[in-house]
Amino acid sequence: MSEIEPGQDPVREDPRIVLLKERIERIERTEKVRTGQRDSSADENTRLGNRVLAELVGGLAGGALVGWFLDRMIGTSPWLLLVFLFLGIIVAFRNIMRISTRRPKE
């Protein structure tokens, strides 16, 4: 059993430990800045934004490309291009709604 120094409350934490914890936290923050590490929640939000953008651009481009190709093959210009472009928009917004209503990880 360790002895308690005279005049020190055994329940309270040693102030030296508190100061040491503060110094360690400050050094860890400066080290993260120095090495370029970022907050993981910001990275997750960036990934989510990139995914939404990719869904929107991919839906538009994919629908337009398929419609244009089928118009060239069948000769129904510009009707299939318009139909598939609108289908691409609908699919993109459906996927964005699905992404936005997903529950966050805890």
Image (tube, grey):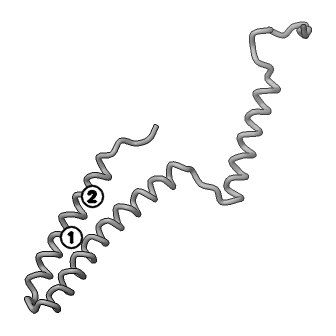
Residue at the location (75% across, 27% down)? 18
The foreground one among 34 and 78 is 78
The kind of residue on which mark 1 rests is: Gly
The foreground one among 78 and 69 is 69
Disc 1 element: helix
Q: Residue 5 vs residue 11: left or right?
A: right
Picture quadrant of residue 22? top right
Q: Residue 69 vs residue 52: left or right?
A: left
Give residue 88's mark. 1
**Residue 11 drawn above or below residue 98:** above
Q: Residue 31 vs residue 7: left or right?
A: left
- For label 1, the crowd category at 10 Å Cα-Cα, with few meaning under 14, some 14 to 19 and many 20 or more, is many
**Residue 14 drawn above or below residue 67:** above
Q: Name the residue under label 2.
A: 95
Picture quadrant of residue 76? bottom left
The image quadrant where one finds the N terminus is: top right
Can you give x and y, in whole percent of width and height, for residue 51 in the image? 38, 62
Q: Residue 61 vs residue 51: left or right?
A: left
Can you give x and y, in whole percent of width and height, for residue 33 in the image? 67, 56
